[in-house]
Amino acid sequence: MTSCYLQKGPVRRDFLVELAEKQDSMGWLAGRLNYYRRIFPAYFGLGNSQLTFWHEYPEINSNYLRHKLGEYYMPFLQKANYLGPYDREGIPLLDYRGSLGRQYNPIAIAQFGLGNFNAFCRSGNTELRNKFLAVADWLVGALEPNEKGLHVWNHHFDWEYRTKLRAPWQSALAQSQGISVLVRAHIETGSKVYLATARVAFETLKEQTCDGGMIHVDENGDIWLEEYVVSPPTHILNGFIWATWGIYDYWLATADEAARQLFVATMRTLKNNLAKYDMGFWSLYELSGTKLKMIASPFYHRLHITQLRILHELTGDELFGHYAAKWDSYHDSSFNRNAALVYKSVFKLLYY
């Protein structure tokens, strides 16, 4: 039997390209519709969503100790009082709405644990201590090998980034804040299990992303910790800074020279590149290389200011204090705030 394709002659290549482009367009449109079905209820619907957890006002914890492990550098007390949902063990779940629904997010779980640790340190309330240790125990059980044999805290759900993150995906931010929980659990309880788990997790922070790790070394030799492991890397600022604190905590807990060197290297990276995040009226969220740069939302701009002030205190480096003050002056301007909001809205329409 003769193929009907052969009877009609060869299929033109431009037709195949056009068909593929239409299929890609339909797939993109379907993905966008699913995204908006999920995101609009999260922003405008009733009840808790993942945004209920994340958007705590950024501030410095005045009780943290500069050169000794104690309370975490930001209070996270609102996160400690998260209204739920939770699983049976008291571990927070984030409700992403839509097809994603309720999910374990290792970053949120670690921040919930750190918030409860801070609250416990202030009150001595054993219930808060138990919540903190429940998180530490979850982190011990949830650490798992990736395809390269390095141990990570995975996110087991797809996530809409410009390069879609397919489950399971890892994050230097999750890795670092998980370590910050575990070294404090070790000091609080004396249990070697927590420190041993932190040590295994820290090994992954030392390796490059191409080898299953969390760091990217750029063409200038600068070392980046990647919140989202994508190619090309995007260098998300808040995630990078938070990730450096986990390395600092591990160094304080262990006096590990590799941790000290890695922290120093990341501070050098930040100093070499911080000016790239300055738009002249607002800060950037990331260095993605898109034609229209991804500006920070008002929340993340405030977070950058807080993080840089903490780094100024931790390191004594005046450059961090300079940019914190400069970006704070941007935030004080209503013109700048409105310009940033318009810019951010246009970016979202074009790229998300």
Image (cartoon, rainbow, N blue to C red):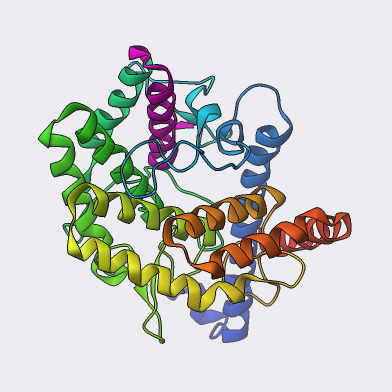
Residue 115 included in the magenta stretch of the image: yes
Closest to the observer, 202 or 11: 202
Q: In the rendered image of this protein, does residue 155 appear above or below residue 89? A: below
Closest to the observer, 4 or 30: 30
Q: In the rendered image of this protein, does residue 53 appear above or below residue 74? A: above
| Residue at (71% x, 28% y) in the render | 45
Closest to the observer, 159 or 196: 196
Q: Where does the magenta region start and end?
A: 101-127
Q: In the rendered image of this protein, does residue 322 appear above or below residue 140? A: below
In the image, 243: left or right of 287?
left
Quarter of the figure with the N terminus: bottom left
| Residue at (39% x, 43% y) in the render | 65
How far across and down, in percent of the image, does residue 34 sit? Answer: 62, 44
In the image, 332: left or right of 88?
right
In the image, 185: left or right of 92?
left
How far across and down, in percent of the image, does residue 63 sit? Answer: 46, 36
Residue at far right of view? 335
Closest to the observer, 295 or 27: 295
How far across and down, in percent of the image, does residue 18 sit? Answer: 64, 76
Q: Is residue 283 visible?
A: yes
| Residue at (44% x, 53% y) in the render | 242
Q: In the rendered image of this protein, does residue 32 appear above or below residue 283? A: above
